[in-house]
Amino acid sequence: MNLRLRDLSPDVEAVVDHVEELHVADPIAVRLRDLGFVAGEPVRVVAKGPIGADPLVIQIGYTRFGLRRAEAARVFVREGAA
Amino acid sequence: MSTLNIALVGNPNCGKTALFNRLTGSRQKVANYAGVTVERKAGEFRTASGKTVRLLDLPGAYSLAAASPDEAITRDICLGRRSDEPRPDLLVCVTDATNLRLHLRFVLEVRNLGVPMILALNMSDAAERRGIHIDRERLEALLGIPVVETVAVRTDGVSALIERFDRQLPPAPIAQPADADLHVEVRRLLSQTVSMPRATAAIDDAIDRLVLHRVWGLAILAALMFLMFQAVFSWATPLQDGLDTSVRFLGDLLRTQMPDGALRSLLVDGILVGAGSVIVFLPQILILFLFILILEESGYLPRAAFLLDRLMVGAGLTGRSFIPLLSSFACAVPGIMATRTIQDPRDRLATILVAPLMTCSARLPVYALLIGAFIPKQTVLGLFNLQGLLLFALYVAGIVAALGVAYVMKRLRRDETEHALLLELPSYRVPHVRDVLIGLWERARIFLQRVGTIILSLTVLLWFLSTFPSPPADAVGPAIDYSFAGRLGHALEFIFSPIGFNWQICIALIPGLAAREVAVSSLATVYAISAAADNAATELTPLIAAQWSLPTALSLLVWYVFAPQCVSTLAVIRRETGSWRTVAITAGYLFGLAYIGSLITYQVARALS
């Protein structure tokens, strides 16, 4: 079952399913894919910001990124190891 | 001998700048690309065979599908689209050997440009320590481009790369089909050439668990900021006192050695005071930059931006605004220079516009004078010192005003699109002394060049205005009263009397434009105290306490919270944004806020007293 990366619990292993474009040629979605948010990539929520759990720290590939909740909401993931 | 144009490209955080420093040493030129405020770093060196290499350090980019002005520059130069920059003969694509999943995708993108290129596996020592094994030869064969290992922080770490520059240029790589999925290709390359025990460094995980923690993380951030402030304001003091004494000694020397006249006055009261007021801030600024550089090099800065992002976004800024705004507490000039770390132009502009509202250290002498003269040394609630409380309130007023202004700007702007954070948190690194020193030297030079020239010319102009015409022989009042500045001060009185300023204050505001703290010595001049006296402020205190009303003093304090009383800040805004319109908006809104704030303060205080 797909859920949004925004709603994934910390330290739960998951795999990227797809990145949703909020509008046509959504630059943020394009950039997320460039950074490695593509189908099959293992992903994990490492930490959540101190205020309103925003932004999130995401481990993707070998890299960590800080993503705002609105950015992480574009990424759909499946729980479970790759 | 032939010259080779080489450009370094790569993802942000691949160690590209360290590699550039290693290759070129201190023979670097830092400027802006024409028409944009993106830093252009170039350097030259010679290879063993005597070939001259012109090296360009292109801005870090995640993709050639540019998302910021920095990335657009990198793309345009790689494509040979800029008329002021030749297309590089050779691209060195720099990667962090521990972060190949991300960096190889960009390498493949660059390879499709069809320009001769070399892949540098940088930080290969760190990769080795983490047990990452990369089959270099196999990677070379699969990619069809030369691959070399580099360790930018070691003297011999770039010899393999330099040796490559002496050989014939590698053939231009063959472009792949446009619809090829680069991520699939990266995975294939990794599975065939790289073995990696674990995806992250164990040490990074451990540090991040603490540093990104919602309670401990904020506590560590607060402690670091406290240390930084402590350093900026207390470590710098002996150095500043030393510089101040030397400048004054030089002034006294000139005063005794030269005949009285306009030239002596220009040298002592114009140039020396002007240059002195800049140089005195240099120790603070260097310490500030030292801290920022260490935090930046270690990888901590993006973590701080992460912790504070939500707070800043609420006010229409971004987590990345934090460091520039923090620096502005020492001086808005380095703060505005530090906004270069914000790639998004809209976020950057918003940060620049509110940076002057942070209480810079040049306001302190003015605050100290007024608070000392008008606020009794009284204990409030048995704990707090009333003078200290007011000073604290002035700092808070600046911060609240900045958040408010940023919020109003967010509401006013037409561009409602979402701007992303997408902030990489790189691996922690021990900052390298050489890179920190080069960075420090670079920033100090830019500060002195930009601010020095502007302040100097303006102080000379203001000196002229406050010196000429000289008073008639039978003059009774202070000389400045007869000068252009004096006349201007009198003329301005009708504008400023509703906010409680007398003509003496109006006159002092004019030279105070060069640097805020100069207003104190100008006031001393107006009240006919020798401005050169060490204790101008001490002598001034009883005088203004007797002559000014409390509402006037409070109004002037509020004026100093907001007023754009610093031409160098405006000049740096002009340099960093390239736009007079931004300067006009900044100056305009600050004046407006200052006038309204002072008007309310004065009228309310008068009604109450």
Image: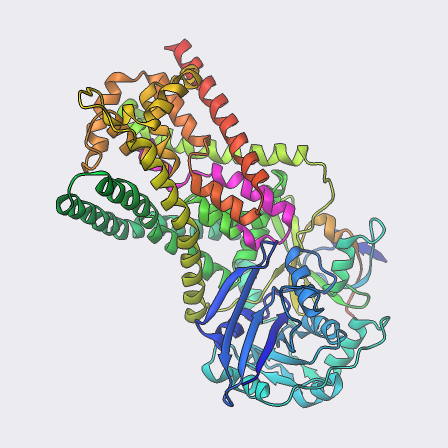
Residue drawn at 23 percent across, 27 percent down = B540
**Quarter of the picture holding the N terminus of chain B:** bottom right
Q: Which residues are magenta?
A: B339-368
Q: Is residue B377 visible?
A: no
In the rendered image, residue B341 lying in the magenta stretch gets the answer: yes
Seen from the viewer's position, the closer of residues B403 and B595 is B595
In the rendered image, residue B44 lying in the magenta stretch gets the answer: no
Q: Is B282 displayed left or right of B422 in the figure?
A: left
Seen from the viewer's position, the closer of residues B205 and B566 is B566
Q: Main secondary structure of the magenta part?
A: helix
The image quarter in which residue B458 lies: top left
Q: Position of residue B549 (x, y in %)?
A: 32, 16
The image quarter in which residue B346 lies: top right
Q: Position of residue B113 (x, y in %)?
A: 75, 73
**Quarter of the picture holding the C terminus of chain B:** top left
Seen from the viewer's position, the closer of residues B296 and B155 is B155
Q: Position of residue A23 (x, y in %)?
A: 84, 49
- Compared to residue B202, the image places residue B569 above or below, namely above
Seen from the viewer's position, the closer of residues B156 and B225 is B156
Pick out the residue farthest to the left. Answer: B256
Q: How many marks?
A: 0
Residue drawn at 45 percent across, 31 percent down = B563
Q: Is residue A63 visible?
A: yes
Residue drawn at 39 percent across, 17 percent down = B500
Q: Position of residue A76 (x, y in %)?
A: 81, 57
- Compared to residue B134, the image places residue B342 above or below, namely above
